[in-house]
Image (cartoon, rainbow, N blue to C red):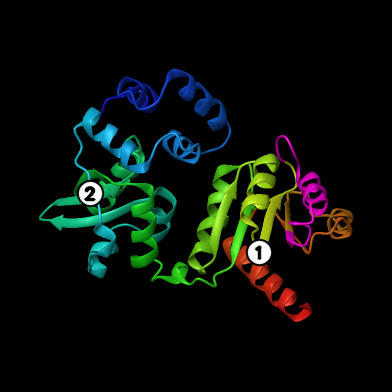
Amino acid sequence: MIQKKPLGDLLVEAGIITVKTLERALERQRGSGKRLGQILEEMSVITGEELIDALSKQLSYKTVKGFSEYTFPPELLALVPQDMAVQKLVFPLKLKETMLALAINDPFDQETIEFLAKKNRLQVIPILATRQELMIAIEKHYLHGKMKDMERQKILVVEDTAPVATIIQVALLKEGFDVLVANDGVEGLKQAVAEKPDLIICDAVMPRMDGFGLMRALRANPSTADIPMILLTSKATGEDEQRALEAGFIDFIAKPVQPIRIVTRVKRAFELLKRFK
């Protein structure tokens, strides 16, 4: 079993971040559904390589780099379901007798490791890898390079419930879209201004800024005023739909979300936008 000491404490002890930086990261992490390591990378206070090197020293785990360029047989890839690879950022590296070497970014995700061990009746040996390396490998070997297309369309998902955001993200990644995720309206506004996505899917009710507030803020900025938006909401009455369309949303999707419905509506939105260009 690995140590239960929090990741932040390990990084502070290793001298990679300060206590104040950790406090800021933990504040930013609250309610985001993101892992601390991802938050620290987004804050540009730690690189992916520094993160896994620190964890490797503290937990005595091996690390792996450059594996995305290798060739992996289909039977090996089948040991990790595609959805789990995308959602959990794990990748099967090698099968030897009853042992499966698994590239991971979060060594504290024992639930995933135990699930794969039980599912495949194998001993799982976790090996640390950077988020970037894992994403490249998953895109190439599970999604068959769909996301390598430079013309792929970029979608920003603004949703404060992490499981819902993940369902949407995985469904759209499978279709070859480039997907960004923000966990509230303010973060969504920042990403929209910085990234200029081709489409935004946002929840109606969110902390700090709701979907309608996000719509107004984006329309007030000339650089984002023309970005089309789809509203997600648990309220599906005719009045709610009318309000959404009158506010400027191009479509309206009722919760609970279903992957096939999300993909269908997104593709329809892009088809309609293409016709009116």
User: Residue at label 1?
Assistant: 198
Q: Residue 60 in the image: x percent, y percent?
A: 19, 32
Query: Would you say residue 226 sits in the magenta stretch?
Result: yes
**Closest to the observer: 52 or 260?**
52
Whether residue 196 is situated above or below residue 10 in the rendered picture: below
- Answer few, some or many: residues within 10 Å of disc 2's Cα (few below 14, many 20 plus, some between 14 and 19): some
Whether residue 234 is situated above or below residue 9 in the rendered picture: below
Residue 223 sits in quarter? bottom right
Kindly identify which numbered label has been placed on residue 79.
none
Q: Amino acid at mark 1?
A: Asp
Q: Amino acid at mark 2?
A: Val
User: Residue at label 2?
Assistant: 64
Residue 187 sits in quarter? top right
First in sequence, mark 2 or 1: give its number: 2
Q: Residue 88 in the image: x percent, y percent?
A: 40, 48
Q: Which stretch is magenta?
A: 206-229
Q: Residue 102 in the image: x percent, y percent?
A: 25, 50
Q: Residue 195 in the image: x percent, y percent?
A: 61, 55
Q: Secondary structure at mark 1?
A: loop
Q: Residue at x 26, y 37 (%)?
A: 53
**Closest to the observer: 252 or 234?**
252
Whether residue 22 is situated above or below residue 129 in the rendered picture: above
Query: Would you say residue 45 sits in the magenta stretch?
Result: no
- Classify the position of the C terminus by image quarter: bottom right
Q: Residue at x 74, y 76 (%)?
A: 272
Whether residue 220 is situated above or below residue 148 in the rendered picture: above
- Classify the position of the N terminus by image quarter: top left
Q: Residue furthest bottom?
A: 275
Give the Cα distance between marks 2 and 1: 35 Å
Residue 220 in the figure: left or right of residue 136: right
